Image: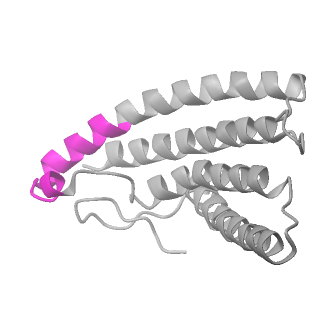
């Protein structure tokens, strides 16, 4: 695993436990996209060749992709590959970049903490009632997705806090 390098050309930092967690979850989550693509191919084949579509592929694909998307947020944050207006950021000097990073990471942390709180409430409620989709397959997809959203938001909050702490300690 490569060391995370702070923006502005500072020396690389040793990866933290949170960095390794974000990278590990992101690496695992990317496989969920591949599984979703494979079962989609299976669905198209079964429908086209045998005229026998399934009731589970659509729900499974939604569940796999949304889970991968949420778990990938912390991965992108750890690698500093999140959305940024680079045409402006790249023209800033190191001091201005540091201030920009501190402000944006602080605001992001407030947002992600609120997201974590509210997705946690939704996941708890969904688990307590064993929420199901109500469609033909009636799989507990809402419960799985809400729990994945909470887990992804929680790890994203940890990674955002770690990045903020790391950037604040730089001189």
Residue that extends furthest to the front in the rendered view of this protein: 51
Q: Is residue 128 left or right of residue 19?
A: right
Q: Is residue 142 left or right of residue 92?
A: right
Across and down, in percent, residue 81 comes to: 39, 59
In the depicted view, which residue is nearer to us: 43 or 52?
52
Assign the magenta stretch its main secondary structure: helix
**Which contiguous range is marked in magenta?**
87-105
Q: Residue at x 43, y 65 (%)?
A: 4
In the depicted view, which residue is nearer to us: 9 or 143?
143
Quadrant in the picture for the N terminus? bottom right
Q: Residue at x 87, y 74 (%)?
A: 50
Image height check: is 139 above or below 71? above
Across and down, in percent, residue 143 comes to: 80, 35
Image height check: is 121 above or below 8? above
Image height check: is 96 above or below 12? above
Q: Residue at x 71, y 24 (%)?
A: 122
């Amino acid at each position: 695993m490569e060391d995370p390098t702070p923006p502005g050309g500072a020396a690389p930092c040793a990866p933290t436990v949170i960095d390794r967690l974000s990278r590990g979850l992101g690496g695992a989550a990317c496989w969920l996209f591949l599984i979703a693509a494979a079962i989609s191919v299976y669905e198209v084949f079964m429908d086209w060749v045998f005229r026998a579509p399934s009731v589970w592929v659509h729900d499974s694909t939604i569940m796999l992709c949304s889970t991968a998307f949420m778990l990938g947020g912390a991965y992108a944050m750890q690698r500093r590959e999140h959305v940024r207006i680079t045409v402006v950021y790249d023209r800033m000097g190191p001091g201005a970049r540091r201030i920009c990073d501190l402000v944006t990471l602080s605001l992001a942390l407030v947002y992600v903490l609120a997201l974590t709180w509210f997705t946690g409430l939704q996941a708890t409620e969904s688990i307590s009632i064993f929420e199901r989709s109500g469609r033909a397959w009636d799989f507990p997809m809402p419960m799985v997705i809400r729990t994945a959203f909470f887990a992804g938001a929680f790890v994203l909050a940890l990674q955002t806090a770690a990045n903020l702490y790391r950037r604040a300690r730089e001189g």
